[in-house]
Image (cartoon, rainbow, N blue to C red):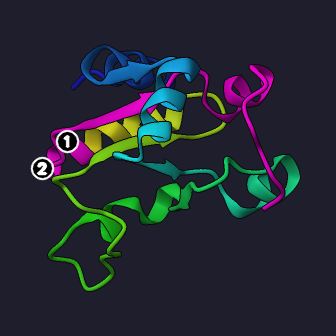
Amino acid sequence: MSTKTAAQLVAEAKQQVETLSVEQAADELASGDAVLVDLREPGERAEHGVIPGAVHAPRGMLEFWADPTSSYHRPEFDPSRRVILHCASGGRSALAAGTLRQLGYENVAHLDGGFTAWKSSGQPTEKA
């Protein structure tokens, strides 16, 4: 069996999932038809801030919260809804988008550059 690096896994995921620019994500969120999911850890959110309206789902809990058959399922996660994922820079969100697709989420994308790109572009943020 050949092994892969984390960077290789992220690169493969980015080829297989939909990637949105900050502008595309902002437009979709403004329409009210998408849910934005923040995969970052609580410490990252506390230190750097959050995107207003984003649902927090730490990467380690995503599958359990998103799976409708799980006792940990959260109602914010609906496989029929548009889901946009973000992390700090786009690696974790690309991997997570692939995982959600395996769970039956067909309309999922991730934010290219993550929170860092969002904040750098001047989009609104707030304290966690």
Q: Is residue 6 above or below residue 29?
A: above
Residue 26 visible in the displayed image: yes
In depth, the one of 59 and 111 nearer the eye is 111
Quadrant containing the C terminus in the rendered view: bottom right
Between the C-alphas of marks 1 and 2, the distance is: 5 Å
Task: Out of 64 and 121, give the one closest to the viewer.
Answer: 121
Q: Is there a contact, CB below 8 Å, between mark 1 and mark 2?
A: yes
Residue at 39%, 35% (x, y): give it. Answer: 95
Label 1 crowd bin: few (<14), some (14–19), many (20+), radius 10 Å: some
- Where is residue 89 shown, x and y percent of the image? 63, 28
Q: Position of residue 27 (x, y in %)?
A: 48, 28
Instruction: Tell me which corner region of the image, top left, top right, bottom left or bottom right, holds residue 42.
Output: bottom right
Q: Quadrant of the N terminus?
A: top left
Question: What amino acid is at disc 2?
Answer: Gly
Q: Which residue is mark 2?
A: 104
Q: Which residue is mark 1?
A: 101
Which of the 4 quarters of the picture holds residue 94? top left
Q: Nearer the viewer, residue 80 or 28?
A: 28
95 w.r.t. 59: above or below: above
Q: Which residue is pictured at 22% across the width and 78% down the height?
A: 70
Q: Which mark is residue 55?
A: none
Range drawn in magenta: 100-128
Q: Residues within 10 Å of mark 2 (few under 14, many from 20)?
A: some
- Determine whether, in the image, residue 75 is placed left or right of residue 8: left
Left or right: 20 with respect to 107? right
Vertical comparison of 52 with 85: above or below: below
Q: Is residue 4 visible?
A: no
